[in-house]
Image (tube, rainbow, N blue to C red):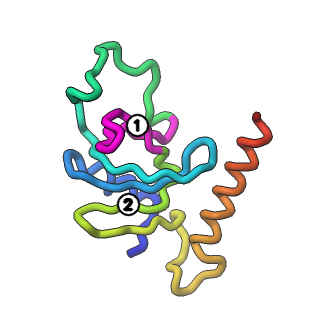
């Protein structure tokens, strides 16, 4: 099923406490799949330090999730989410205001591939 980026962010935020899988593009341009939960405030595997964050992740389009495989907190870039799986339903993310994949060209996958390529190029230039 295809959903807009805005709906994918809403879906992730409403899944508090549920295990979800999010596939997104990391800052270095690589894809990452994270299985975990939002709304985790403490874990015996990754105790909170009590100091809090020195920035607001929302200002950067990020959301904190607890990665159940790595047993650690991770940031998900909400602007580069490719897929979200909640309650066994897989949602493919298309850009906001994009027509349905049934009647547009290029496909949302092609657009996302171009975005990933541009992010990788940017990362290589900054190295």
Residue at image point 68% right, 49% down: 119
Considering only order in the chain, which callout, 1 or 2, is on the residue closer to the N terminus?
1
The local secondary structure at tag 2 comes to: strand
Residue drawn at (35%, 68%) of the image = 90
**Magenta-colored span:** 60-76
| Screen quadrant of the C terminus | top right
* Figure check: 9 above or below 113: above
What is the C-alpha distance between the residues marked 2 and 1?
Answer: 16 Å
* Element type where label 1 sits in the image: strand
Instruction: Estimate the x, y position of residue 67 in percent, counting from the top left.
Output: 34, 41
Q: How many marks?
A: 2
Quadrant hosting residue 52: top left
Mark 2 against mark 1, which lies toward the viewer? 1
Judged from this view, the residue extending furthest toward the right is 125
> Picture coordinates of residue 4 (x, y %)?
45, 65
Q: Nearer the viewer, residue 45 or 10?
A: 45
Q: Is residue 73 magenta?
A: yes
Q: Residues within 10 Å of mark 1 (few under 14, many from 20)?
A: some
Q: Is residue 84 left or right of residue 86?
A: right
Is residue 29 something that shows in the picture? yes
What secondary structure characterizes most of the magenta part? strand
Left or right: residue 76 compared with residue 10: right
Residue located beneath label 2 in the image: 84
């Amino acid at each position: 099923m295809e959903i807009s980026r805005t709906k994918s962010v809403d879906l992730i935020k409403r899944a508090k406490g549920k295990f979800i899988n999010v596939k997104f593009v990391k800052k270095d341009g690589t894809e990452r799949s994270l299985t975990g939960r939002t709304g985790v405030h403490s874990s015996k595997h990754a105790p909170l330090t009590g100091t809090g964050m020195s920035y607001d992740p929302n200002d950067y389009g990020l959301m904190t999730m607890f990665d159940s495989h790595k047993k650690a907190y991770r940031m998900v870039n909400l602007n580069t989410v490719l897929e979200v799986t909640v309650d066994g339903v897989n949602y493919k993310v298309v850009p906001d205001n994009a027509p349905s994949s049934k009647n547009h060209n290029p496909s949302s996958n092609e657009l996302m591939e171009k975005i990933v390529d541009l992010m990788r190029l940017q990362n290589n230039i900054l190295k």
